[in-house]
Amino acid sequence: MTPRRWAELTWQDIRDLPKEPGVVVLPIGAIEQHGPHLPVWTDALLAERYAQRAFELLPQDVSALLLPTLSYGKSNEHTGYAGTIALSAATLMSVVRDIAAAVAKSGFTRLLFINTHGGNKAVLEVMLRDLRAEFGLLCFLAQGQHDTSRLPDIERRFGIHANTAETALLLHLTPPLVKTPLPAAHYPAFASQHFNLTSAPQVGWLTRDWSADGHFGDPSAASADDGAEWFEQLAASIAVQIAEASTFRVAND
């Protein structure tokens, strides 16, 4: 079986691995408040578990190598709550750049990020192009997808943190870490007709602007069964993206 965990290999192993085709995968999460019911580990845990499961689902002929999870992210929207550890955008960009530099120096040509924290997304989107320009790496940002059709419209729009889905996922993955009783639904009183919370046109905000307890959505509607179903959907969609990234080429490469 082809080795797939960077941290378990020697430097000679990594040197001698075939580099083409292939992709190196970096899960990125965060350590930040997740309401009164979920651990601060939530995003980092999800990044790690999605990556692990996605690699289990990969066909053996897909060449992919999994880096250890980067647990810290740009979480300054959650400052003001104990336990949040927030990197600045500049720090996260520097850390990602240094990791990418090492990946490139080891001979690899593709790097894929599995991101589970919304606050990292804009930073990583900038880095995709910067890393391509500086190191020649083809970089990808993977986002897992799951069926949200059963959720109410208000949950799909405003359930963005420690919500039904995240609570369900942790009820499936780490039930002892979910505190009960689950809190009631909380949605921000966001009345704007022209701006959104998470997509352009957008307004800058902090969690404490809208939620004293730190959650947006309805944790009380979560179930472990839904979490198991969504987890498999998310991991499977990430596995497909890893497989495609491993052989992706540009026209003039």
Image: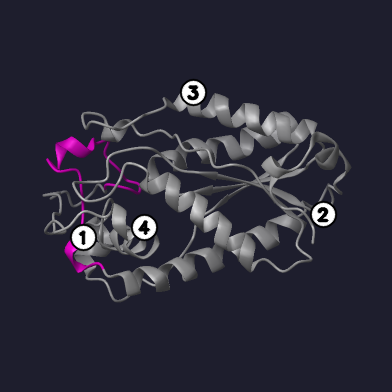
Provide the residue designation for mark 2.
21
Sequence-first disc among 4 and 3? 3
Provide the residue designation for mark 3.
91
Residue range highlighted in magenta = 197-222
Callout 3: few (<14), some (14-19), or many (20+) C-alpha neighbours within 10 Å? few
1 above or below 73? below
**In-front residue for pair 253/13:** 13
Provide the residue designation for mark 4.
174
Pointers 1 and 4 in contact (CB under 8 A)? no
Quadrant for residue 239, please give it. Answer: bottom right
Pointers 3 and 1 in contact (CB under 8 A)? no
Q: Residue at x 12, y 40 (%)?
A: 212
Coordinates of residue 52 in the picture (x, y in percent): 57, 57
CA separation, marks 2 and 1?
Answer: 42 Å
In the rendered structure, the answer to whether residue 58 lies left or right of residue 40 reads: right
- Which colour scheme appears in the figure? one colour
Sequence-first disc among 2 and 1? 2
Q: Amino acid at mark 2?
A: Pro
Element type at marker 3? helix
Q: Nearer the viewer, mark 1 or mark 4?
A: 4
Q: Amino acid at mark 4?
A: Thr
Which numbered tag is attached to residue 219? 1
Q: Residue at x 16, y 48 (%)?
A: 192
Callout 2: few (<14), some (14-19), or many (20+) C-alpha neighbours within 10 Å? some
**In-front residue for pair 16/143:** 16
In the rendered structure, the answer to whether residue 116 lies left or right of residue 76 reads: right
Coordinates of residue 29 in the picture (x, y in percent): 45, 43
**In-front residue for pair 76/7:** 7
CA separation, marks 3 and 2?
Answer: 31 Å
**In which quadrant is the N terminus drawn?**
bottom right
